[in-house]
Amino acid sequence: ATVNFNTAATSGTLDLSGGELGGPTTFTVSGATTWSGGTMSGAGQTVTSGPLAITGNFQSLNTRTLTINGGATLSSAIGLFAGEGAVITNNGLFDIQTDAFLRFNGSGTQPTFSNPAAGTLRKSGGAGTTGFTLILNSAGAVEANSGTLSLNNGSTSTGSFTAAATTTLNFGGGTHDLNAGSSVSGAGTIGFSAGTTVNVGGTYNPTELTRINGATVNFNTAATSGTLDLS
């Protein structure tokens, strides 16, 4: 079904497994939300005040703003698409529990993931790579706690970036402006891939490996690293 909310609406819980939730107004869920299929679209906003469980199944967020106030998990071996200028605003913990991706679907204006000061974007599971091709604006925390988290479409940040031991936090594409107030640290690997430009204006002090593979990394403040692989 296609359900367009043309006036503001609320629900105790939401189970979206197919079809389309749309409309120009705000739809607020006070309790738990499960999203395992279907599309959220339209010029309006979906607000999840309780926990949001996303099972990646090629579903898409188009145009719409998804505001997450109660935390979210992303699981499955697939992932979530976004396009047409969609915005995800994460005001809690967004926990990627597998190698699921968050990916621009190629339609219209590129989507944005906004991670305010109270937000944490974390990869906590999966030994492989989570590709993240939404534009990231982060004043909060970005954490690679398992496998590889690869930020592939640029960012503007004043928050923290951390790679735990045996993991990789990779800047994999676009231009990343790590402005004053930002920090990059951890006992894992910090990677910079070919075609990426990174401007480091905050603290940079990972204790293990910095790997620069064809990227341009401008250190505009003093920086340290345990080891360096420049290729």
Image (spheres, grey):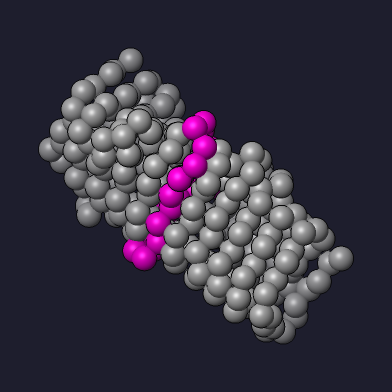
Magenta stretch: includes residue 78 = no
Look at 37% across and 46% down and name the residue there. Answer: 143
Tally the marks: 0
In the image, 65 versus 209, the foreground residue is 209
Q: Is residue 35 above or below residue 198?
A: below
Image-based side of 16 in relation to 77, left or right: right
Name the residue at 25% across, 41% down.
Answer: 185
In the foreground, 49 or 105: 49
From the viewer's perspective, is 71 left or right of 10? left
Which residues make up the magenta segment? 116-137
Residue 167 point in image, percent of width and height: 38, 33
Task: Please provide percent x and percent y for residue 189.
Answer: 32, 30
Q: Residue furthest right?
A: 1
In the image, residue 128 above or below residue 65: above
- Report if residue 124 lies within the magenta region: yes
The quadrant the N terminus occupies is: bottom right
Identify which residue is drawn at 59% across, 42% down: 100
